[in-house]
Image (cartoon, helix red, strand yellow):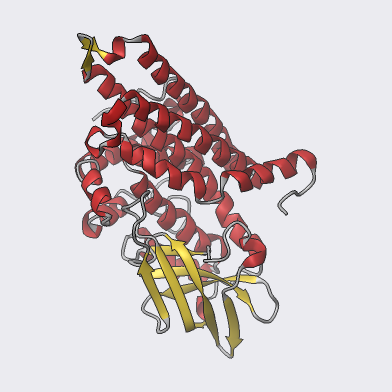
Amino acid sequence: MSFETIGADFYGFENKLTDQEKDLIVRLRAFLDENVRPFANDLWARAEFFDRDVVVRGLADLGLFGQPWEETQQFPNSAVFRGWVALELARVDASVATLVGMQNGLVMGSIAEAGSPEQRAQWLPKFASGELLGAFGLTEPLSGSDTAQGLQTVAKRDGDNWVINGAKRWIGNGSISDVTIIWARDADDNQVKGFIVPTSTPGYSATRIENKQALRIVQNADIVLENVVVPEANRLQKSQSFRETAAVLRLTRAEVAWAAVGNSIGAYEAAVKYAGERIQFGKPIGSHQLVQELLAKSLGNITASIGLVTRVSEMLDEGVQKDEHSALAKEFTTSRMRETVAWCRELMGGNGIVLDYGVMRFFADAEAIYSYEGTREMNTLIVGRAITGKAAFV
């Protein structure tokens, strides 16, 4: 199969990828068309996870886990390429994009950014191969946007071990993970530290959150930690404060922005297809002016967003990306996504609320992408601080 840019890439940004990067995009599309697209609606409706042996192992075999890190990188690639991977995943299903974002960015990123060389060598290959499925335990029942100051999970040093007590909420795949990265406040110095916690550890329990109406394939969980004993060897050795946690979020926030664009494209592609097939007043609705306006506005949002995320990922490759850059990308693309999926659903009329027509899943999943990895309001305040030099968080 040869490489072609997708129709929603109106200005051909994807042509800027290297031949090796394009080759993996082609193979990824084929994998998703065979193993994810045909099953996504049904899994979403039943709130069931993918076939782990097929999807998780398949994504690992493609080399999608661990692309940024030298221990697991299969070939040299750019942050822009990794963004396109997130986009291509999300245009098929936002849950599979979330799965890769958690495994590759939040979990492996925590170990790569805050772990010692020995920890990187021990753990990263196991996640890259799909042998281990990870989760990222930061958000708490009473601590979301104020995590930097409000983290209530506590770790107490006890000789060569740490004893962790607390609770986490909204932890993606937390009920099915093999290992969860737990961020806790050190009882002695009050600083945030990270811990590699196997979910089989006594005192660790996870319960799936029921009745979730977005990203239903992702198994979000409530986690309780009751006197969970973790050896010092499993403390991320470079994690000394929330600064290291923020560094991980900075890396992944831009890829969430890419996923938001992909989710917009998934809805847009469904709308374009529907506009060509749905007959009203004796002709396809795509030949009506108001329908074309909805599609043109959607494409405008998508195109502007691609330009923004491309540049913010280039800045990451150049080593000049800051918190406010990824924050603006996440705020802007998710806001435009919300508009776009609404217009695409509107185009379908009543059929738009039925899973069969392909837009409602993207419409619902947009609400989760809009909120996780920093709400629009918090990202706006990060950018506002950069503009004015004044923090307005409280």
* Screen quadrant of the N terminus: top left
Query: With respect to residue 188, does 36 lie above or below?
Result: above
* Screen quadrant of the C terminus: bottom right
Q: Quadrant of residue 4?
A: top left
Left-right relation of 59 to 392? left
- Residue at 64% of width from left, 66% of height from top? 150
Q: In which quarter of the image is residue 89?
A: top left
Query: With respect to residue 139, does 189 lie above or below?
Result: below
- Residue at 29% of width from left, 56% of height from top? 56
Along the line of sight, the residue nearer the viewer: 215 or 197: 215
- Residue at 51% of width from left, 30% of height from top? 305
Q: Residue 194, how many percent across, how many down? A: 55, 70
Q: In which quarter of the image is residue 204?
A: bottom left
Query: With respect to residue 391, does 273 lie above or below?
Result: above
Extreme-right residue of the structure: 389
Left-right relation of 41 to 113? left
Along the line of sight, the residue nearer the viewer: 195 or 372: 372
Query: With respect to residue 353, does 12 lie above or below?
Result: above
Q: Residue 53, how many percent across, how many down? A: 22, 59
Query: Does the image show residue 72?
Result: no
Q: How many marks?
A: 0
Along the line of sight, the residue nearer the viewer: 394 or 181: 394
Query: Does the image show residue 251?
Result: yes
Q: Residue 302, how many percent across, how many down? A: 46, 27
Q: Residue 189, how many percent across, how many down? A: 70, 77
